[in-house]
C-alpha cells in the first residue's frame, strides 16, 4: 500500500511539473508606458487611438506595447527595502534595490541625457493643462481583479535632486483607477490610462512618479522628468 501511494505521488508531482512547463506564465507587473498620451479624438488608449509625446526615464521606444517585461532588465520596479516598508523605499529604480529591480530610472545629469538616442522624449506641459498617462493592464483589468489605484506624485522642488518616497507621498496630485482600460483580445495587452490637471508649479523640471498598488503594500513605480511651464 505504501509503495502504491508513493508511486501515485510521483505521478502527481510529475504531472504538475509537465503542466507547468506547457502552461505559459503571464507577467503580473506593470509600468508607465507613456507620461504624455495624446488622443486622436475620443478617449482611446490603443496605439490606433493616439500617440505619445513624453516618456519615463530611459524608456526604449519602438517596442511592441506591453512587451517590456521581456526586456533585460524588465521595465517594472517593485519597491522594497530592508525593513520591508515601501513608503520608505527608493522612489525610482537604480537597478540595485527593490524586490523587482526594474530598469534604470535614476536622474541623469543633465536630465535631458535620459531622453536621447533610442530613448523617448521628455514631457513638456503647462500648469492647468490635462496630462494623460498610459500603462498596460498586464492581466489586472479583468472582472475578477480589484480596481486598484495609481498614484501620481509630483515633486514641488524644481530642477533639484529626486525627493524620497515619503516626500513624494506628501505631494500626490491624482489617484487614478487602474482598470480604466480599452479592449484587446489578449488581456495582458489591454491599454489603460488616466488623466489629471497639472497643478500649480513654478516653471521648471520636476519629478513625476507613477505608483501602482497591485496588492496591499505591493507598489510598483515609474519615474519621469517633466518640464512644467507656468505662463501666469
Image (cartoon, rainbow, N blue to C red):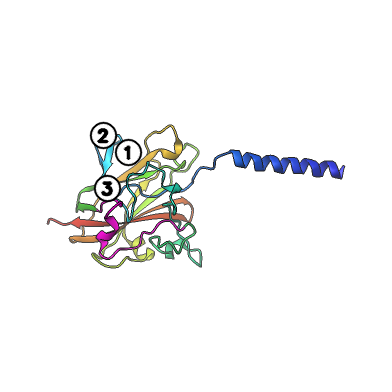
- Could you tell me how far apart the alpha carbons at marks 3 and 1 are, in whole angstroms? 12 Å
Q: Which mark is residue 133?
A: none
Residue 231, given in percent of the width and then of the height, sits at 12, 55
Question: Which segment is the magenta one?
Answer: 101-122
174 lies above or below 138: below
In the displayed orientation, state which residue is furthest to the top.
185
x%, y% of residue 217?
48, 56
Residue indicated by mark 1: 45
Q: CA distance from mark 1 to mark 2?
A: 10 Å
Magenta span contains residue 108: yes
Residue carrying label 2: 42
| Residue at the extreme right | 1
Tell me which residue sits at (54%, 43%) in the image. 25
Say which quadrant the N terminus sits in: top right
Q: Nearer the viewer, residue 229 or 200?
A: 229
Direction from residue 166 to residue 159 in the image, left or right:
left
Residue 131 as seen in the image, left or right of residue 65: left
Q: Is residue 89 magenta?
A: no
Amino acid at each position: 500500500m505504501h509503495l502504491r501511494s508513493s508511486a501515485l505521488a510521483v505521478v502527481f508531482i510529475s504531472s504538475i511539473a509537465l503542466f507547468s512547463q506547457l502552461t505559459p506564465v503571464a507577467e503580473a507587473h506593470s509600468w508607465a508606458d507613456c507620461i504624455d498620451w495624446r488622443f486622436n479624438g475620443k478617449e482611446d488608449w490603443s496605439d490606433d487611438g493616439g500617440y505619445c509625446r513624453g516618456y519615463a526615464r530611459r524608456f526604449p521606444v519602438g517596442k511592441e506595447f506591453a512587451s517590456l517585461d521581456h526586456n533585460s532588465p524588465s521595465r517594472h520596479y517593485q519597491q522594497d527595502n530592508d525593513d520591508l516598508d515601501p513608503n520608505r523605499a527608493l522612489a525610482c529604480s537604480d537597478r540595485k534595490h527593490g524586490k523587482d529591480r526594474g530598469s534604470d530610472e535614476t536622474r541623469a545629469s543633465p536630465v535631458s541625457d535620459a531622453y536621447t538616442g533610442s530613448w523617448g522624449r521628455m514631457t513638456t506641459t503647462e500648469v492647468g493643462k490635462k496630462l494623460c498617462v498610459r500603462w498596460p493592464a498586464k492581466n489586472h483589468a479583468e472582472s475578477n481583479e480589484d480596481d486598484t489605484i495609481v498614484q501620481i506624485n509630483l515633486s514641488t522642488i524644481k530642477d533639484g535632486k529626486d525627493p524620497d518616497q515619503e516626500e513624494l507621498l506628501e505631494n500626490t496630485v491624482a489617484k487614478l483607477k487602474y482598470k480604466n482600460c480599452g479592449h484587446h483580445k489578449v488581456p495582458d495587452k489591454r491599454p489603460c490610462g488616466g488623466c489629471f490637471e497639472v497643478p500649480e508649479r513654478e516653471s521648471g523640471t520636476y519629478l513625476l512618479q507613477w505608483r501602482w498598488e497591485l496588492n496591499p503594500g505591493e507598489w510598483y513605480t515609474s519615474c519621469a522628468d517633466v518640464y512644467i511651464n507656468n505662463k501666469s
